[in-house]
Amino acid sequence: MTTPSPNPGRRAVVAALASLPLGCTAADPEQQAALASSTRTLVAYFSRSGNTRVIAGLIHRSLPSDLFEIQAAEEYPADYLETVAKARQERDDGVEPALRASIDDMSRYDTVYLGFPIWGETAPPVIRSFLSRHEMSGKTVVPFTTHGGYGVGSSLRVLARHAPNARILDAFTMEADQERRTMETVNAWLATPPTVR
């Protein structure tokens, strides 16, 4: 985790992480689609395993904000390795997958907290899709990411390329990749012959 800066928004995120339970979940899809409040802040996130969703929920509960879950129109495979392979192919081919839903009026937001896991040392393809389909000019984008030990990788360059006229702040990062580690630990255990006690 990076050291928080004096930025009040970052302080709110850190305070939220320290004080709220980790069982928070995002609003249901109907509430997300409505985005009916008068707030000027949006928390938009993509999460596969739920780690990024928890952080998004904490931010949303700590700041007056609307919450929007970024989802691909075609879901990624349930199998972790199949998802890794598909994301790598999309990245290498420059694919921006279709989104299940978009935000009708991005102009109402001044600040966008944008959350995602790091996949293949960069932002997932759906984040490129989200940025390409939503005008970010003049907005402040506050990235928050989860990763498996590799940090933000090239994800901030992806944000700068797809939102060239936005003000992109330093990312809040948190190492949280239990799925891959669990898989590797179990596979290593299965590959080791059991001993007799």
Image: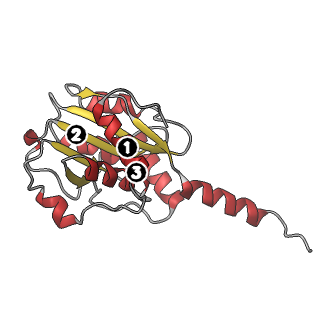
- First reached walking from the N terminus: tag 1 or tag 2: 1
Q: CA distance from mark 3 to mark 1?
A: 6 Å
Q: CA distance from mark 2 to mark 3?
A: 22 Å
Q: Which mark is residue 112?
A: 2
Whole-percent x and y of residue 63? 23, 46
The C terminus sits in image quarter: bottom right
* Most foreground residue, 95 or 66: 66
Whole-percent x and y of residue 153? 47, 33
* Most foreground residue, 141 or 194: 141
Residue 95 shows in this picture: no
- First reached walking from the N terminus: tag 2 or tag 3: 3
Q: Which marked residue is nearer to the observer: mark 2 or mark 3?
A: 3
Task: Sort mark 3 into few (<14), some (14-19) or many (20+) by Cα contacts within 10 Å.
Answer: few
Q: Which mark is residue 15?
A: 1
Q: Which secondary structure, mark 3?
A: helix
Q: Say what amino acid the circle numbered 3 marks.
A: Ser
Residue located 17% across and 52% down the image: 102
Count of labels in the image: 3
Whole-percent x and y of residue 62? 27, 48
Q: Say what amino acid the circle numbered 1 marks.
A: Ala
Task: Sort mark 2 into few (<14), some (14-19) or many (20+) by Cα contacts within 10 Å.
Answer: many
Residue 24 shows in this picture: yes
Q: Which secondary structure, mark 2?
A: strand
Q: Which mark is residue 19?
A: 3
Q: Say what amino acid the circle numbered 2 marks.
A: Val
Task: Sort mark 1 into few (<14), some (14-19) or many (20+) by Cα contacts within 10 Å.
Answer: some
